[in-house]
Image (cartoon, grey):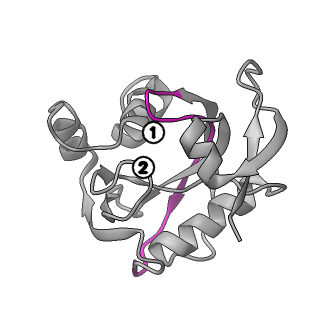
Amino acid sequence: MSEVVAIYDPDDPAGRVVGTAPRAQMRSENLPHGATAVIVRTSTGEIYVHRRADTKDIWPGRHDCAAGGVLQAGEDPDEAAARELAEELGIEGPVLVPLVQRWYRGADTAYFAYAYVTTWDGPVRFADGEVAEGWWEQPARLYERLQDPSWPFVPDTRELLQLPATRALLVGEQA
């Protein structure tokens, strides 16, 4: 049975659910949906960066520093973020701090994002096969690498990391 996801009103700036659709239809028709993103940091500030598995349905093999995914029909965003973090990185139980809620609109996908940040000093394990490899990166080094447009990094998180509030949180710049 196909996964059923929440479909959002693309004209609602606050991200309102207006229906459901099978995940395959959402992807094939590029329907606006909800998704989560969790940036994981250590207590010393390093950010977990990973390379997505080559089997991902969008942006396979690219780098990312947010664990997350599509909201299922009827799923609460906070619960979805915790679920995705556990599925992708094997991280369970940390406090998820809301970072931003906003639309991401790109050529490949359009979704209402529920972004979070969390601190984790424990082990990371690739629980569901969606992550191929990963490492801890200093924020300054990550931002340096993001300046290279040829570095295969997912465009949605690249955009998220450029928001003044996100930069301020991760690298200490003024928002």
User: Around disc 1, counting alpha carbons within 10 Å, would you say few (fewer than 14), some (14 to 19), or many (20 or more)?
Assistant: some
Picture quadrant of residue 170: top left
Picture quadrant of residue 79: bottom right
Q: Residue at x 59, y 36 (%)?
A: 29
Q: Tag 1: residue type?
A: Leu
Q: Tag 2: residue type?
A: Ile
The residue nearer to you, when weighing 144 against 79, is 79
The residue nearer to you, when weighing 16 against 45, is 16
Q: Residue at x 44, y 24 (%)?
A: 164
Left or right: residue 38 compared with residue 16: left
Left or right: residue 152 compared with residue 90: left
Q: Where's residue 129, x and y in %?
A: 41, 76
User: Around disc 2, counting alpha carbons within 10 Å, would you say few (fewer than 14), some (14 to 19), or many (20 or more)?
Assistant: few
Query: Marks 2 and 1: in contact by CB < 8 Å?
Result: no
From the viewer's perspective, is residue 82 above or below residue 13?
A: below
Q: Residue at x 41, y 63 (%)?
A: 43
Residue 2 colored magenta?
Answer: no
Q: Which mark is residue 116?
A: none
Q: Where's residue 61, x and y in %?
A: 27, 57
The residue nearer to you, when weighing 110 against 67, is 110
Q: Residue at x 23, y 36 (%)?
A: 146
The residue nearer to you, when weighing 64 against 3, is 3
Q: Where's residue 92, x and y in %?
A: 59, 77
Q: Which mark is residue 58?
A: 2
Picture quadrant of residue 167: top left
